[in-house]
Image (cartoon, rainbow, N blue to C red):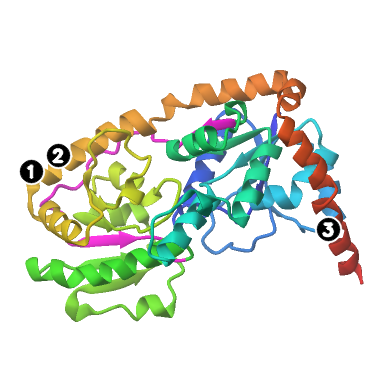
Amino acid sequence: MKHLVIIGLVIPEPASTAAGHRMMQLIELFREKNYRITFLTAANNMDFSEKIDVEKIEINSKSFDEKIKTLNPDIVLFDRYVTEEQLGWRISENCPDAIKILDTEDLHFLREARRKAFAEKREVNDQDFINEIFKREFASILRCDLSLIISEVEMNLLVQKFRINTEILFYIPFLSEEKQENKPSFADRQHFVSIGNFLHEPNWQTVIKLKTFWKSIRKLIPDAELHIYGAYATEKVFQLNNENDGFIVKGRAESAESVFRQYRVLLAPIPFGAGLKGKLWECMKFGLPSVTSSIGAEAMHKNLPWNGFIEDSDKNFINKAVELYQNEKVWNQANDHAEEILKQVFDKQLYVDQFWKKIADMKENLQNHRAENYLGIILQHHQLNSTKYMSRWIEEKNKK
């Protein structure tokens, strides 16, 4: 049986994070091809994690070498660049014939560039991209045989600006399959909603922005409420709760689907970030139109009409939120747009055959594939002479 080993930064939490949902979709892809799957991680987030077979590992330890040699995988999938940084060299040494795949989740250096520009109240410039995360993430991409890119914008950035060879990249967004039936109608829904894991800084900044918008929206729709959901909400989040104003912090959602099925409009004025926004993708599946920012909708709809509105000015955002909430015709049109986006951008069948063809071609020509990746060879050499020996030093230090 073919064997996939996933090295996870955290255990997937698909109910809490888009990254968790993404990882479970990739796991399902490999399950459909009858791969044996082993998930290795040093993380401890078990309470809300997906029920998958997990084996604990130590990062700076020879025990990993013995474990990976015993597992002898055909493919190793790294969950974000950090895991490749920590353990990629050990895979190369102990399982040299295993295909190394990096799931970037999103480009962390891009998110950091935008965060910095947001904090400094200015536009992003090219110099912002060349941050410390860029150097590390870019090196991980080059060291791997293939990197999975979730956003077309990020794919174009890597190829056109940074000249990465397309042979080591594969674009694969969130994947939609079955069409959701029996979605509640306009009349069966009420209130606004926002949702997002609070370990992710853009989600906190989104809620801060909504707090500034809410009085204007409530003035125009006095009976409406805004319910804020998100895993890992801290005390500073709950301090925003004000039931008299209809601004209600709910905390972790037990079921994202049930949330998306009961509200009328999702509000997501996301100020910065990268990748794709899982909540906006799930909105489309469950019949919940949204008002978001350009960053929120980035790479999610090609040139198709959005399932709601995309607005970056505060005034327009507020007005469109009210319009979408009150106008049933506009609301129904938004849901029609969602169906078209799911079909043309996220349909699983658009990507799965190409993905497996890519994997098959790499298996047959792995040495040639690697030989063409000159920068990867150089970076692999330097990693074995830097990261490797740092890890060995920590390993020896821990023994004492």
Q: Residue at x 81, y 45 (%)?
A: 382
- Depth check, mark 2 against mark 3: the one in front is 3
Q: Residue at x 29, y 34 (%)?
A: 341
Q: Amino acid at mark 3?
A: Met
Q: Amino acid at mark 1?
A: Lys
Q: Give the structural element (helix, strand or loop) at label 3.
A: helix
Residue 333 is marked as 2
Horizontal and vertical percent for residue 369? Answer: 71, 23
- Give the vertical position of 95 relative to 89 (above or below): above
Image label count: 3
Q: Residues within 10 Å of mark 2 (few under 14, many from 20)?
A: some
Comparing 116 with 285, the one in front is 116
Q: Which residues are magenta?
A: 169-198
Q: Give the structural element (helix, strand or loop) at label 1.
A: helix
**What whole-number distance in Å separates the C-alpha atoms at marks 2 and 3?**
57 Å
Horizontal and vertical percent for residue 53? Answer: 64, 49
Residue 390 is marked as 3
> From the viewer's perspective, is 208 left or right of 398?
left
Horizontal and vertical percent for residue 11? Answer: 59, 55
- Give the vertical position of 275 relative to 251 (above or below): above
Q: Residues within 10 Å of mark 1 (few under 14, many from 20)?
A: few
Q: Amino acid at mark 2?
A: Gln
- Residue 219 in which image quadrant: bottom left
> From the viewer's perspective, is 106 left or right of 257?
right
**What whole-number distance in Å separates the C-alpha atoms at marks 2 and 1?**
6 Å
Residue 329 is marked as 1
Q: Do tag 2 and tag 1 residues touch (Cβ < 8 Å)?
A: yes
> From the viewer's perspective, is 278 left or right of 4?
left
